[in-house]
Image (cartoon, rainbow, N blue to C red):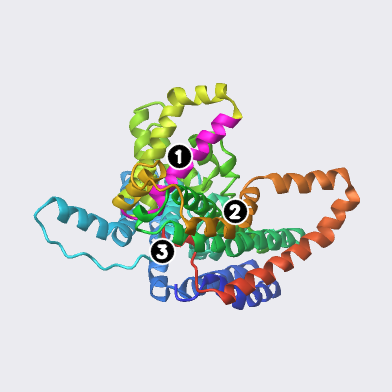
């Protein structure tokens, strides 16, 4: 995107809010949201609004056909065709180059590498359409006659480009009757500001050092330099992605929509399985309900089902063997935890299990950060003193001193400590709690807005990491 979607919101969100609250009719409001959502998408990807519209209409029309011929072979045929079309769209734009390169490397072919630009958010909105079609086919929801509802479901701007992945059943009633209240609007503003602060104040600042510490020539880095860089990246990607999710949920509340939660303090987890119950929960729910359970879940071909899901989880994140390895790595950990490791961790205690989980996550993020196998392997070998044995460098000392405060703040902010402290203070002293809610929260929101605005104006464009997925 040439211009940040955040700047688009800065410029046009006030206009949208005025229009939304001037028009009380739900139909008008829905069309206003649809128009704004397409404008939001077109701000950075004007050519791909056609793809977004076509994908939405394909889902809409196929769902009507499935509904019409329910219980017959025509319904099943249309369902298979609809899923194939959506996977085909995602596969062409996201994986065509990867597949061509691998075919050329294995077979004596010289197929030209397709120069295809990846439309932002395609992984999210195609999965949402698949959710919708599957639920219509299973009969858990009915296909609406109005295309307006599907257009709003797919294009709703808060979750359009980086999730969370929502299901039509999540907002079916809200489309017809959004619950707009002053308390919900206020909660939405605060949630949006928390997400804005996570992204702009914490994630962006962490990212500046990550790009230096985890450079492509990992062999020139020190042991502690790689460890510190991976720690910073782990925090960066958490605040980047959870920050976007917070903004999406906050914006939804402002317009009377309750979107599903996507994060639950993943870095306090005590196992790989626990981590994935807390991280990108909407994606995990998709693979569980629409892939793992239909394949047989724990009942039939459990091992196959587990590794199919984790292969797809890795591949969904990007057309790279590193992502596939990353997904299978977590699949292996979860398998071992279910076999014996989980029981051992329970006996070992909270400290050991948390240390194991943290180590497992950091090793996993190495595969996630680097885009090629050689760089990831060199980084991992360096982390354990097997490639570059230099413990630390003068540059690392400088980066460590410059980022120590931010590092500590980020660690604390990634836990429920602040939320727990705020709740306990409010419960123990109602007057203090009323003051914090009445004055403290609005003041904090204003402070975040001012600081984030200054940082955005004073820095080059830094997109959300999950835009590329």
Left or right: where 332 falls relative to 43: left
**Who comes first in sequence, dot 3 or dot 1?**
3
Pair 3/1: label in front: 1
Q: Residue at x 43, y 63 (%)?
A: 56
| Residue at x 72% of width, y 64% of height | 445
Camera sees residue 175: no
Q: Which residue is mark 3?
A: 57
| Quadrant of the drawing holding the N terminus | bottom left
What secondary structure is marked by label 1?
A: helix
Q: Residues within 10 Å of mark 1 (few under 14, many from 20)?
A: some
Characterize the magenta stretch by its predominant secondary structure: helix
Across and down, in percent, residue 174 comes to: 62, 56
Tell me whether the residue at label 3 lies in contact with that at label 1, contact meaning CB atoms closer than 8 angstroms: no
| Whether residue 77 is visible | yes
Q: Nearer the viewer, residue 150 or 13?
A: 13
Residue stretch in magenta: 351-372
The residues bearing labels 1 and 2 have C-alpha atoms spaced at a distance of 34 Å
- Dot placed on the residue nearer the N-terminal end, 1 or 2: 1
**Foreground residue, 234 or 90?**
234
Name which residue lies at 47% across and 44% down. 362
Q: CA distance from mark 2 to mark 3?
A: 46 Å
Q: Which mark is residue 407?
A: 2
Q: Is residue 360 above or below residue 419?
A: above
Which x, y percent locates residue 173? 61, 54
- Local packing at callout 2 (Cα closer than 10 Å; few below 14, some 14-19, many 20+) is many
**328 within the magenta span:** no
Going from N to C along the chain, the mark reached first, 2 or 3, is 3
Q: Residue 249: percent from the left, percent from the top?
A: 61, 57
């Amino acid at each position: 995107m040439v211009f940040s979607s955040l700047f688009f919101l800065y410029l046009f969100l006030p206009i949208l809010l005025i229009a939304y609250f001037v028009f009380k009719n739900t139909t008008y409001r829905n069309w206003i949201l649809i128009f704004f959502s397409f404008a939001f998408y077109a701000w950075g990807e004007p050519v791909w609004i056609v793809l977004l519209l076509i994908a939405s209409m394909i889902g809409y029309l196929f769902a009507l056909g499935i509904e019409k011929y329910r219980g017959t072979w025509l319904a099943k045929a249309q369902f298979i065709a609809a899923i194939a079309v959506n996977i085909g769209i995602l596969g062409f734009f996201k994986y065509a180059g990867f597949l061509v390169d691998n075919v050329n490397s294995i077979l004596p072919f010289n197929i030209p590498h397709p120069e295809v630009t990846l439309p932002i958010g395609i992984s999210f909105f195609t999965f949402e359409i698949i959710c919708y079609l599957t639920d219509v086919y299973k009969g858990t929801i009915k296909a609406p006659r109005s295309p307006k509802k599907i257009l709003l479901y797919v294009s709703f701007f808060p979750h359009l480009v980086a999730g969370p992945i929502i299901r039509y059943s999540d907002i079916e009633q809200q489309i017809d009757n959004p619950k707009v209240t002053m308390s919900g609007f206020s909660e939405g503003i605060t949630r949006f500001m928390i997400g804005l602060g996570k992204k702009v104040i914490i994630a962006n600042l962490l990212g500046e050092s990550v790009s230096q510490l985890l450079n492509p020539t990992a062999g020139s880095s020190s042991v502690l330099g790689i460890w510190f860089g991976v720690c910073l990246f782990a925090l960066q990607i958490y605040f980047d992605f959870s920050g976007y999710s917070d903004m999406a949920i906050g914006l939804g509340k402002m317009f009377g929509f309750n979107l599903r939660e996507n994060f639950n303090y993943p870095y306090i987890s005590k196992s790989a399985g626990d981590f994935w119950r807390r991280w990108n929960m909407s994606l995990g729910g998709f693979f569980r309900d629409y892939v793992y359970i239909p394949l047989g879940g724990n009942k039939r071909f459990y091992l196959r089902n587990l590794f199919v899901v984790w292969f797809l989880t890795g591949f969904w994140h990007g057309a790279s063997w590193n992502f596939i390895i990353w997904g299978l790595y977590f699949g292996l950990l979860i398998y071992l935890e279910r076999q014996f490791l989980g029981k051992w961790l329970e006996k070992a205690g909270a400290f050991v299990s948390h240390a194991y989980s943290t180590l497992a996550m950091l090793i996993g993020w190495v595969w996630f950060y680097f885009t090629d196998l050689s760089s990831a392997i060199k980084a991992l070998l360096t982390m354990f003193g097997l490639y570059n044995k230099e413990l630390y460098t003068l540059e690392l000392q400088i980066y460590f001193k410059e980022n120590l405060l931010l590092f500590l703040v980020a660690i604390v902010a990634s836990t429920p400590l602040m939320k727990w402290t705020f709740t306990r203070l409010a419960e123990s002293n109602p007057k203090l709690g009323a003051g914090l809610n009445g004055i403290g929260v609005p003041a904090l929101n204003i402070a975040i807005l001012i600081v984030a605005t200054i940082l955005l104006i004073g820095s080059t464009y830094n997109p959300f990491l999950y835009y590329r997925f």
